[in-house]
Amino acid sequence: MTSSKFWMVWPDNVGLSVLVLAVVAMAFLYAARKPMHDLIRSSGGALGGPLRIAARWLLAAANEINHRNKAVLLAHGRQETGQRIEREFERLGALVTRDLQGYPTLQRKLLDEITRIEEDYKKCGEVPPPPPEWAEAVASVAKVKTTGNELVLRVLEEINRSITSIHDKTLAEYRRAYERRHKILESFMPFWRSVDKTLTAVDQKLSGLQNGAATVDAQMEKYEAIVAKTDKAEHALTVSAFTQFAIALLVMLIAAGGAFINFKLIALPMSEMVGAGDYLTSTLRTSEVAALVIIFVEASMGLFVMEALRITHLFPRIASLGDQMRRRILWIALVLLVTLAGVEAALALMRDMLIADKQALLQSLATAPQPIATDGWVAHIPTAGQMLLGFILPFALAFIAIPLESLIHSTRTVGGVLLVALVDTAALVLRVLANVARRMARVLITLYDVAIVVPLLVDRVARAGFAAKRGTVDVEDSAWRRS
Amino acid sequence: MIRALLYALLATALAGCGDPRSHAQAVYVLVDTSGTYAQEANKAQVIVNYLLGTLQPGDSLAVARVESRSFSEKDIIAKATFDRRPSQANAQKRAFRDTTNGFVAGVRSSRYTDITGGLLQGAEFLRETGAGTKTLVIFSDMQEELDKVTVRDFPIDLKNIRVVAVNVVKLKTDNVDPRRYFGRLEAWQKRVQGAGATEWRVINDLERLDTIFGRS
């Protein structure tokens, strides 16, 4: 008997051997059905249970992180909005002081102009003197009937001439009076314009105040929402943090580009100062590290300048310093920054000289004659450009303190949100795995039953027969009891 | 910014430690001046110029001639360890170029060719420089010819040195039977590698020197 046939009950009959073994196996499997079911079920439970617990723990952790994130976010938002409101109030205060301080003068001016206009208006109301009273006498004389008396006629003619003369005089005076009034009215114009201008200025100032008040109102509304810890406020702050993060990151990338250019400008000439043959690692030269250190020191000085100017608030210690000490720090940092910028400009010049020297050497070493570069003023443009860049870039780098602060603050929120998402995803994955483990246990139990389907069928039939027989006995028993 | 400061501090700390390994290169050029090969000396100048343009501040370079007996400091035409400051290094390179130009202009052929002596002298120089990469360039047809008195048939030590044979021209006899040429090169390879050299290379096209000295 070969080793491959050791399991055969009848080595010459494979089919019968398999059948016998299957029957025996089924019998054993049927006998072990309950403990095997329990084993599979408990294995599924043992695998799925911890996974579910871990998933639950992760969910709780995510919840906790979320709460903390919310608390931090709201606290930060509260602080920021509070500061903004404070600044708006300061701005409004300055506006009120600036605009309304001169308001009494303005009012006095306005009143003076109105009084003047009023007086002039009254002057306009002055009517020309009435015709003399003797006009009534003339009217009476006019009623006298002409009888043809020559004396009377002459008197009347004389009277007519006098009256005509007086009429002309009075009319002329009347016209002059109206002319005067027109002139007075004409002189109103500048005053009206002045009043109009003054009122427009007042209107503008009041509109500015109104706008400022509206901004304060909006900020206050936001502040109230943050204090009330509403979801809307949290969402708005989160979105704002993401936006800030993206913008700050972009600006930092641009600044990194600037720093790289700066590095390229000073790395070569630094080898003239610290030597070109020293290496910190197999690829990193000491001169390159020295150039990096200079750039970092410049950035740090810029940071201190920004801190001292209270533009950024990364170091509470500097922010809490007295004005005098802060000013000292500002000046020290500024002087160092200017010095380093000057050093960089000099290094940029040296770089150009070194490259030119190297180029000249290579030309002298070359076997083929090299074209000689023109040495006109155009050749000095790159040198001047390099020096200018070397001087300007440190100051430009100083401003990275602002996006850096935004980046640091927004990273807390963005990182928190991403962490929550990560933990949530992990919890979901663990939950799914736990469910898969439990389902797999059920599938295995079913498969087990499929493998022993024949004994199970026999068992079911036997149980049914036993139940039927028992049912008959029960019926006979009840009939006997009734009888 | 805090991260930048940390990097700066780290870099400063690293600067205090530094990499103890030497990253400098040392190159010793042996120029064969024996027989008709002396006519090739102009090409040696090309190699030296190439090396002057390639080597960095802190690197070392020496040029020596191969004569009837070459194990002598007197055979070193010019040697220099370039200053760590690039400007000074450039000045040194100019002076080096002038010296080797003078040598090439007035080269006289020697009767015998003591390559082994030159190798011994070169290995000594290279070891003394303490450079991280040591290269021995042999500008020769690799045909060694010694007088009866000179003894060179003993093991030599070329550990941690790579040997590059440049411009190995074919002799008239090589043209008759090329196996002589290949056999000569094979014998040198065996000897050099047996002496512990890290690498043995033959470069006949001078344009391919970049593969040896080009730095990444």
Image (cartoon, rainbow, N blue to C red):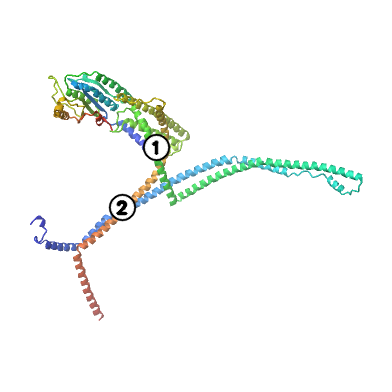
Percent across and percent down for residue A379 are 39, 27
Residue count near mark 2 (Cα–Cα under 10 Å), binned few <14, some 14–19, many ≥20: some
Farthest residue, direction bottom: A483
Q: Please, what secondary structure does the residue beneath circle 2 have?
A: helix
Q: CA distance from mark 2 to mark 1?
A: 40 Å
Residue linked to disc 1: A255
- Image quadrant in which you'd find residue B117: top left
- Image quadrant in which you'd find residue A366: top left
Q: Which mark is residue A369?
A: none
Farthest residue, direction front: B176
Residue A41 visible in image: no
Percent across and percent down for residue A389 are 41, 31
Percent across and percent down for residue A333 are 43, 32
Q: Nearer the viewer, mark 2 or mark 1?
A: 1
Q: Measuring 27% from the left and 20% from the top, which residue is drawn there?
A: B101
- A392 vs B64, left or right, is right
Question: As shown in the figure, which amino acid type bears the numbered disc 1?
Answer: Ala
Foreground: A70 or B11? B11
Tell me if residue A14 comes above or below residue A413 in the rendering.
below
Percent across and percent down for residue A67 are 39, 50
Instruction: Quarter of the image for the N terminus of chain B: give it.
Output: top left
Question: As shown in the figure, which amino acid type bears the numbered disc 2?
Answer: Val
Q: Chain of mark 1?
A: A
Residue A360 visible in image: yes
Residue count near mark 1 (Cα–Cα under 10 Å), binned few <14, some 14–19, many ≥20: some
Tell me if residue A348 comes above or below residue A158 in the rendering.
above
Foreground: B163 or A394? B163
- Is the residue at mark 2 from the same chain as the one at mark 1? yes
Precedes in sequence: disc 2 or disc 1: 1
Q: Chain of mark 2?
A: A
Q: Which mark is residue A429?
A: 2
Foreground: B65 or A325? B65
